Amino acid sequence: MNHLILLFSLFLAPAFADKESQKTNQNFSSKNASHKRLKRDWIWNQMHIKEEIDTPLPHHVGKITSSVRNNNAKYIIEGEYANTIFKVEETSGDVYAFERLDREKKAEYELTALIIDRRNNQSLEPPSKFIIKVYDINDNVPVFVQKVFNGSVPEMSPVGTSVTKVTAVDADDPTVTGHATVTYQVIKGDEYFTVDDSGVISTTRADLDRENQSTYEIIVKAKDAPGSSGDSSTATVVITLTDINDNFPVFKHSSFHFKVPENISVGGEVGRVKVEDVDEPQHRNTKYSFVRGDYRDTFEIVANPFTNEGIIRPKKPLDFEKVAEYRFDIEATDPTVDLRYFKSGGSRSISTVTIEVTDVDEPPVFTKLPYEFKVRENDPEIRTLGSVWAHDPDAAKRKIRFIRRRASPNGDYIRVSDTGIIQLPKPLDREFSSSYNITVAAQEILEDGRLSDRESHAQVHVIVTDENDNAPELVYPEEPRVCENAAPGKVIIRISATDKDEISPRGFFKYSLATEDSNFSLVENYDNTANITVKYGQFNRELAKIHYLPVIISDNGDPELSSTNTLVISVCKCNEKGNFTFCEERAKQVGVSIQALVAIFICIFTIIVFFAVITLLILLRKRHKKDLSSLGRNVAEIHEQLVTYDEEGGGEMDTTSYDVSVLNSVRKNGIKPEAVPSPYAQVQKPPGNITSGAGEMEMMIEVKKDEADNDRDLLPYDTLHIYGYEGAESIAESLSSLESGSSDSDIDYDFLNDWGPRFKMLAELYGSEPNEDFVY
């Protein structure tokens, strides 16, 4: 092949050089038509060189030659790699490579050849471009595009099923036969998989089972130069077997045993049976079925979609007293298994289930549910409607006590005895309620007489049949009005009635007027309504502006009942078209219920009591203020009633400065006398010492003290009058302990020590600790 390329280049090079010479001649002739030159051509061999030549450098590439005959001619080359990788011999034109070339890095080089006069460096020929091609040698190993490849294939796939594809790349020249051709070979795992020349890996066996081995790791080799032992590379391929549903579930145990109380609810969980399915969860679709046993109507087995377990549930209530143990066989299967890959020879997966029912204390069980009774309303003779019955389902067979739990409507309308008898304490009224419902609870009586805490309930429904015990009533329409000039036969209003009793389809009302002595007539419509019409016409508003028309309404019940209802009709003024222009306003009757009246009376009574209490408090407050005002009069005024003087008092020993009779005047029944002008206002201080006055004074004080000690309701008038003030002109003002003891003042009384011997006792008293209590 190399020889063919070389020959092709030798034939092509002269033609290429001839074209370049022609172009050069044309250019020169166009530039200077007057000068004619001889035709000259660049002459050189085809430039090519093999890569990676292992002979010593430099390597001869080729030779550039010009037809110019000039002893001073000089060859030079220009270009990117000129005078570095490639150099030319100046005189001969031989081109050499001074480096070993690698085609995979650069396949060809483009250079420019020039011939110049070495004397003046003038070009002797136009420059010409030429290409040096690097020939490939098979020097590169095929390389996989990745070191590890991944693939997957369903288990049990037929032979030749494609798994994945591997790719290796050879950097050599693909145009050279055998240099870039890659072949593949499985060198590990070839007993399970194979690979073709395009790199596609496929299966070689049809029995690859994921449950036995789920992944395979094979090694693939890539090499070039088929038929030779050229270089090669390897890559790892990880192949995963995907799951298919090819296995049936298998019970983990040959039998299962469960215990369950007999009061388990329908649909409750009795237990779970477990199976093992080696397929992946998405391919597990276990179905459970009964094989042997007569209890498929009692239990059901439902598969849990997440755990694949079989959940056993009761379909109806269990009864220990009837069946204490259940035993049956169940089978587990999977209807979605692909039978093409089913492994024959496997046995059916069957397991035995035993369910043991345990006894519990069950509540009583009612019989003949539901209970419904009918009774006529207002029948005083009916006292017993019937009875309810319940029994103990357990072996103990205890006695039952019945209790009423709830009632609708609420009230003592229906009773139930301890033995379950339904009783009526009083007749029932259908108009109050057409049906009565009670909830009856049944409880077992224990051996010690107590009631069991477990109970069951039954609903008792009592229907009250109707009796004709209510008369029909008028349905009062809007205010009926009639024109004063209405013509005879004019329809005033259409009336209808209602009845609290139950109206049968054949029931009807009859209407009539209580008196014919009126200007109105009644016409039956035979549809349970009637029309009130004008009888004679021409009403006189001067005589009567409102007419009261009694209407009798009766039913056709047994017995027949009737009622009289008053229809109030207003006579109005009308225009020529018969439209009402003026009517008197009727006083509307407002009905108030008994509950509303009671509430109103309670409110009024509360308001009256409230105002009475307020008034009493005000009177007591005024009286209290009056007493306080009489007691709290100006202290100077009280003092003026006792004694008047302008000099300082004589202290405790001075008993002759005022008249004792003034103090005696306040002893009457312990009540302070009314304030009157004091007869002693101008009493002067008597001269001398009166010993008799001292005795009376002492006796009066003792009497007052005794009264104050024995009567807690009286105010201490003696203390107020005698010690309330100490001299109007005294700079010390009041020295009474009554006022100072109740004062919160923080006055420092040490200044009393500076007032002389007369205030020595006060200085000693008020100079003590402030928290001491003094008794006078």
Image (cartoon, rainbow, N blue to C red):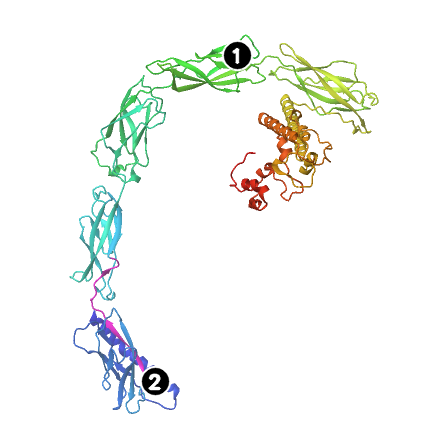
Image quadrant assignment for residue 697: top right
Query: Residue 25, position in %: x, y?
Result: 34, 85
Three-letter amino acid code at disc 1? Pro
In which quadrant is the N terminus drawn? Answer: bottom left
Within 10 angstroms of label 2, few (less than 14), some, or many (20 or more) residues? many
* In the rendered image, the vertical position of residue 227 relative to residue 379, given as above or below: below
Disc 1 target residue: 425
Camera-nearest residue between 617 and 137: 617
Residue drawn at (20%, 67%) of the image: 139
View extreme (left): residue: 229
Question: Does the stretch in magenta take in 28?
Answer: no
How many numbered callouts? 2
In which quadrant is the C terminus drawn? Answer: top right
Disc 2 target residue: 25
Left or right: residue 212 versus residue 622 is left
Marks 2 and 1, how far apart in space? 145 Å
Q: Which stretch is magenta?
A: 127-146
Q: Earlier in the sequence, mark 2 or mark 1?
A: 2
Camera-nearest residue between 727 and 272: 727
Query: Residue 117, position in %: x, y?
Result: 29, 89
Left or right: residue 234 versus residue 366 is left
* In the rendered image, the vertical position of residue 40 relative to residue 375, given as above or below: below
View extreme (top): residue: 381
- SS type, badge 2: helix
Is residue 384 among the parts visible in the rendering?
A: yes
Please identify, in this view, whether the residue under mark 2 or under mark 1 is nearer the observer: 1
